[in-house]
Image (spheres, rainbow, N blue to C red):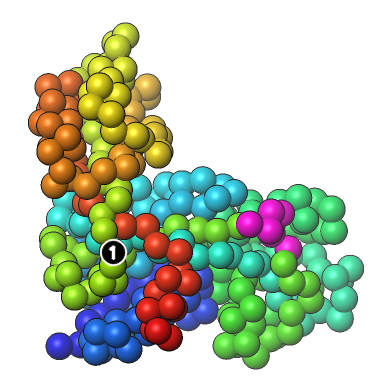
């Protein structure tokens, strides 16, 4: 069987790069063939899995500079059948791609909102008067550059090579240790063969709503984890989109859902929550670990 893996397109995005590294590992270590399927948005990428158009998706969920990718979180909440199988952490190095003769000629910069935000200080320093235009991905506007000598795109070095476009500046992200966590998502459980051999579930992602916005509504669910000695590595709120002031709470717990303590926590959470969704237990791997398995 050939696996189909959805990612944010067009080709050359960081999501595609993460997916390619995962595919290389699947092919060389597990002997599993896979093809990549680009989609125009992150939401459509995840819906493709939920609608069984593809087997897996690789989507960004959190950046070390700009925080959570909210569309990923919101779509996971909306689509009940999706399960996180693995998380990959990949370094992100942004480049300024343009056919302009020099940086002073640039009047417009296109990119994904996350990429624009991750380069905000650099843009304010070197291109303070340019118009910043958000796009669905870091590669969506690359084909415009040959027709517009005053435009630039923030994307990756790999994207510049794929589209045969010149790089004006490299490493323009505001912080050198910029990295993004990507999720490998499937519909339901995925065979262990698709995961690294030494992978052990270290995190469980979940989200819940509370019955009413009253004192203690959030404290009580959080106390469940504290009393059982389960550390939480991320807590974030998102609007329910039903009414102003109503929120969902997304949590990453440092435990496997199959562990006794975590099972007790999940059972007790049902007492204090309105809706509780478990997105899955998984390991978080630096992208180089997959590379080591491939070369090892």
Number of callouts: 1
- Identity of the residue drawn at 62% across and 71% down: 155
- Going by the image, does 18 lie left or right of 27? right
Q: Is residue 173 magenta?
A: yes
Give the percent coordinates (x, y) of residue 242: 28, 31
Q: Dot 1 lies on which element?
A: loop
- The image quarter in which residue 19 lies: bottom left
Numbered range of the magenta stretch: 172-177
Give the percent coordinates (x, y) of residue 202: 30, 51
- Going by the image, does 2 lie left or right of 169? left
- Going by the image, does 168 lie left or right of 52? right
- The image quarter in which residue 30 lies: bottom left
Give the percent coordinates (x, y) of residue 69: 45, 50
What secondary structure characterizes most of the magenta part? loop
Identify the residue position indicated by label 1 in the image. Answer: 199
Q: Front-most of 204 and 186?
A: 204
- The quarter in which the N terminus is drawn is bottom left
Whether residue 205 is situated above or below residue 187 in the rendered picture? above
């Amino acid at each position: 069987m050939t696996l189909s893996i959805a990612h944010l397109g067009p080709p050359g995005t960081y999501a595609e790069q993460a997916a390619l590294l995962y595919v290389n590992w699947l092919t060389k270590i597990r002997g599993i063939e896979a093809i990549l399927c680009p989609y125009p948005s992150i939401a459509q990428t995840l819906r493709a899995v939920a609608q069984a158009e593809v087997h897996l998706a690789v989507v960004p969920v959190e950046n070390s500079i700009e925080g959570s990718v909210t569309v990923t979180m919101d779509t996971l909440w909306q689509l009940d059948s999706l399960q996180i199988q693995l998380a990959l952490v990949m370094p992100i190095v942004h480049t300024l791609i343009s056919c302009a003769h020099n940086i002073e000629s640039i009047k417009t910069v296109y990119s994904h909102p996350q990429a624009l935000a991750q380069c905000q200080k650099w843009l304010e320093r070197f291109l303070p008067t340019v118009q910043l235009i958000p796009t669905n991905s870091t590669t969506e506007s690359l084909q415009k550059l040959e027709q517009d000598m005053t435009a630039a795109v923030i994307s990756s070095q790999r994207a510049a090579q794929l589209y045969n476009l010149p790089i004006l500046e490299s490493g323009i992200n505001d912080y050198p240790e910029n990295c993004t966590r990507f999720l490998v998502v499937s519909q339901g459980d995925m065979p262990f063969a698709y995961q690294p051999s030494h992978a052990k579930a270290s995190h469980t992602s979940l989200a819940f709503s509370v019955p009413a916005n009253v004192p203690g509504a959030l404290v009580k669910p959080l106390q469940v984890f504290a009393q059982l000695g389960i550390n939480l590595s991320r807590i974030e709120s998102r609007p329910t989109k039903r009414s102003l002031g109503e929120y969902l709470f997304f949590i990453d717990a440092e435990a496997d859902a199959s562990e006794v303590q975590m099972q007790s926590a999940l059972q007790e959470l049902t007492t204090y929550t309105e809706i509780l969704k478990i997105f899955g237990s998984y390991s978080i791997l630096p992208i180089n670990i997959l590379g080591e398995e491939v070369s090892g």
